Image (cartoon, rainbow, N blue to C red):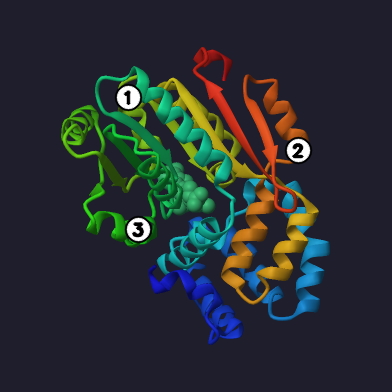
Amino acid sequence: MAISYLVPYRRTHNPWAEIKEILADLKNLASQPDYVEAVKLNTEFFRATRSPISYLCWLVFKAPKLRRNRAKVTELADLPLPRWQKAVLETLSFFEEWMPTLLPIKNRVVRELEKLKESKQEPIVVASLGCGGMELERQIIYQLIRKRFCFPAVFIGVDYSAASLEVATSKFQNLTSKGLVHMQTITHLGNNELAKLKAQAASQGFMVVSLRNDAFALKELAENSFDLVYHARLRHHLTSEEARKLDELANHLAPNLVELDDIFSVRAIIIMSIFMWRFPAILNGGILSCLRDYSKRELRLKRENGWQVDMSGRHLECYLGVREKINSTEI
Ligand SMILES: C[S@@+](CC[C@H](N)C(=O)[O-])C[C@H]1O[C@@H](n2cnc3c(N)ncnc32)[C@H](O)[C@@H]1O
């Protein structure tokens, strides 16, 4: 296990020094017009985390306003600050490795792959949009290996952040060094590149491809290029217009879409505030993500739009959404 997984819990971790460094990085970014609002919001957040009282005031007076205006919320990890993107992705992967927060989507994707294996002649190709550190793919592949799933499959992880590739590469080191998985990195995926990957996969078993690009760049691919498209904890990063486009894109790219994200609740905010208090960058990701998440009421409405939605988890709740291809005008 890479030692970096333990970073959030190292004893020498100094939250005050971290807040100071984050505030300095935000100050440097403030001169870029695209990030003025995001820098202001995040600076307020990190100043508040300097004391429990000011953080409590932020939670009581500021957080409800952000929830009402959540399309404008940008997390620290959404900003072009690779150091903090990496810290947040590593910690998210850490939690996902040790807590069952990916279980519903992992089980669902494995089930879909087993079904596909029965009907396919050529390698299965699936795409994970906003794949982050690819912890989900690591868990899926381990499960498939345990189940002796002997069928070539290509996992294409799409993410535009450089931190994603770094974290994913260290995650798969164990499997790649044993020759159980072949990993490669690309920056563009067109129809020709996809055909080549499939041909390669036919002789290689499991292939993991890290595609460092915007997920929306996949729209140039032919219809049903993938057997399955899924994403975990991506939706809350998108504006409502981007979320609509993402549904359209997924509907174009595959016959099935599976997604997982967390559900907004005051209880989740309280739990995260207590347990993440010593880790300001992580606290920022947890709390601002939660403020952007769907509520249970919104998820019930989603059911009316052709989605099958299952909610799970007791204290930190999440939902699994599944949808089969529909007529694009219905999106
Ligand atoms: C909260 S992380 C989730 C990572 C991973 N799916 C997981 O559950 O551990 C969201 C990821 O989506 C990526 N992302 C957001 N918008 C994206 C886009 N338009 N194209 C590609 N990646 C995107 C971010 O860079 C980030 O790594």
Instruction: Mark 2 and mark 1 in contact? Answer it, CB < 8 Å.
Output: no
- Can residue 171 be seen in the rendering of this structure? yes
Real-space CA distance between mark 3 and mark 2, rounded to the nearest whole angstrom? 33 Å
**Which residue is at 73% across, 70% downward?**
274
Along the polypeptide, which appears first: circle 3 or circle 2?
Answer: 3
Q: Secondary structure at mark 1?
A: loop
Question: Quadrant of residue 320 in the image?
Answer: top right
Observer-nearest residue: 20 or 184?
184
- Give the position of the C terminus as an image quadrant: top right
The amino acid type, in three-letter code, at marker 3 is Ala
- 269 relative position to 143: left or right: right
> In the image, which disc is placed on residue 162?
3
State the residue position of label 1.
225
Along the polypeptide, which appears first: circle 1 or circle 3?
Answer: 3
The label nearer to you, 3 versus 2, is 2
Q: Position of residue 60 (x, y in %)?
A: 83, 63
Q: Position of residue 43 (x, y in %)?
A: 62, 70
> In the image, which disc is placed on residue 296?
2
- 158 relative position to 48: left or right: left
